[in-house]
Image (cartoon, helix red, strand yellow):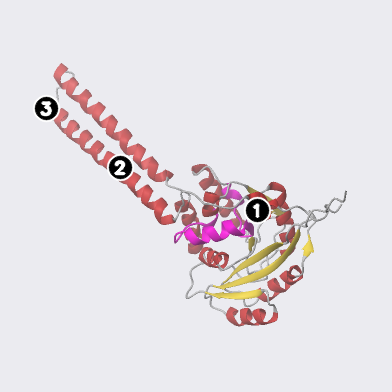
């Protein structure tokens, strides 16, 4: 009896999405570093992969990035330019690139050269080993932004993490590997101003990290001003959920109940003679009941606002996907891992 060898698993295709704002000096080197991955290879974990498409999303920066993008698209058939009508910001440009992709996996990376493309196969191995839909690059060295910016970034993420339990916000990185179906679904429903990684956490339960060394930013100054970084942080806070509104609601109900209790106590004190100041009881009853009513009303309004916020952000009630054992996460290695 002849036993047929199992059919080889399909090759993993990867789309690389690069938002481009001011990449005139660095973008060419980034794409040329990606070029070796345009040829199929087997990862250390035995997974057959290829970078099938590179999506350069023009976010209308101030330099001559468009000419560089055109020349790269002419040189490499895998490279495709995506043109936005105006500057929408890095998150929106990343979502536009995700929506334009068609591969099994999506990798998002910056234009400045700090992300090493050679980490992509390792990130794929991590995703397959952990059966994770999202893999973040975990920096093994301080990010090349300067001490104050690194400290501010980590402190801000840690503060939001304490307020909003759930996804590991501290691990959020712009260098990430995402299942194609998840990335395209998030790009389809996310509302304006939603923090991308929060939206990924809405529909993905397994997140992993892969150690990656960050490099210098190609000698190019950061495109983020202090104001832009503050706006970036505030979007993270607002996208992280409606817990703050729920606290307003609970505060309103609590103060309303306490107002009623103190008002009853003031009336009883007046009747028993323990409060003999003329007019004090009436003033306190009116004030406490009035404040309690206002705060209770604000609590009710906060609940309605919370529902509206979740709706406007595009948070879905569910996301239908295929059998994971039949998709990219179910593919078997084609060779044993290398020693």
Spot occupied by residue 101 in the image (x, y as percentages of width and height): 59, 67
Disc assigned to residue 135: 1
Residue sitting at x 62%, y 81%: 70
Which residue lies at the image location 24% right of the left edge and 27% below the top edge?
A: 262
Residue that sits furthest to the front in the current view: 1
Q: Nearer the viewer, mark 3 or mark 1?
A: 1
Asked whether residue 195 is drawn in magenta, I would say: yes
User: Which sits in the foreground, 273 or 131?
Assistant: 131
CB of mark 3 within 8 Å of CB of mark 1?
no
Dot 3 or dot 1: first in sequence order is 1
Name the residue rendered at 34%, 49% in the picture.
305
List x then y, in percent, for residue 179.
Answer: 62, 56
Q: CA separation, marks 3 and 1?
A: 69 Å
Residue located beneath label 3 in the image: 278
- Dot 1 or dot 2: first in sequence order is 1
Q: What is the CA distance from the residue labelled 1 to the residue labelled 2?
A: 39 Å
Per the image, label 2 sits on a secondary structure element best described as: helix
* Residue 266: % across, % down: 20, 25
Expressed as whole percent of the image width and height from the top left, the position of residue 205 reads 58, 46
Q: Local crowd at mark 2 within 10 Å, few (<14), some, or many (≥20)?
A: some
The front one of 140 and 226 is 140
Looking at the image, residue 174 sits to the left or right of residue 75; the answer is left
Above or below for 164 versus 217: above
Q: Which residues are magenta?
A: 168-197
Give the labeled residue for mark 2. Answer: 300
Cα separation, mark 3 vs mark 2, equals: 35 Å
């Amino acid at each position: 009896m002849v036993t047929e060898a199992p059919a080889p698993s399909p090759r993993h295709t990867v789309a690389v999405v690069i938002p481009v704002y001011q990449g005139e000096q660095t973008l060419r080197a980034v794409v040329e570093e990606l070029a070796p991955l345009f040829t199929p290879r087997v990862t250390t974990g035995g997974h057959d992969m290829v970078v099938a498409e590179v999506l350069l999303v023009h976010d209308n920066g101030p330099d001559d990035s468009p000419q560089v993008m055109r020349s790269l698209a002419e040189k490499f058939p895998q490279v495709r330019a995506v043109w936005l009508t105006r500057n929408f910001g890095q998150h929106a440009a990343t979502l536009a690139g995700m929506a334009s992709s068609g591969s099994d996996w999506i990798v998002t990376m910056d234009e400045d050269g700090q992300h090493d493309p050679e980490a992509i196969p390792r990130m794929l191995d991590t995703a397959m080993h952990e059966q994770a839909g999202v893999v973040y690059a975990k920096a093994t060295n301080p990010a090349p932004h300067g001490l104050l910016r690194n400290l501010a970034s980590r402190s801000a993420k840690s503060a939001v993490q304490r307020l909003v339990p759930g996804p590991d916000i501290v691990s959020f990185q712009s260098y990430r590997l995402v299942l194609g179906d998840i990335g395209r679904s998030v790009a389809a429903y996310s509302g304006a101003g939603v923090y991308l990684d929060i939206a990924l956490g809405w529909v993905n339960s397994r997140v992993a990290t892969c150690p990656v060394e960050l490099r210098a930013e190609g000698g190019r100054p950061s495109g983020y001003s202090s104001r832009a970084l503050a706006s970036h942080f505030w979007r993270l806070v607002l996208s992280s959920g409606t817990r703050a509104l729920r606290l307003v609601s609970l505060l309103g109900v609590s103060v309303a109940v306490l107002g009623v209790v103190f008002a009853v106590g003031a009336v009883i004190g007046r009747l028993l003679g323990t409060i003999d100041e003329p007019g004090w009881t009436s003033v306190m009853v009116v004030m406490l009941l009035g404040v309690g009513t206002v705060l209770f009303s604000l609590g009710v309004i906060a609940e309605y606002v919370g529902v509206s916020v979740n709706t406007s952000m595009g948070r879905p009630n569910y996301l239908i996907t295929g059998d994971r054992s039949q998709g990219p996460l179910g593919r078997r290695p084609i060779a044993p891992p290398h020693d």
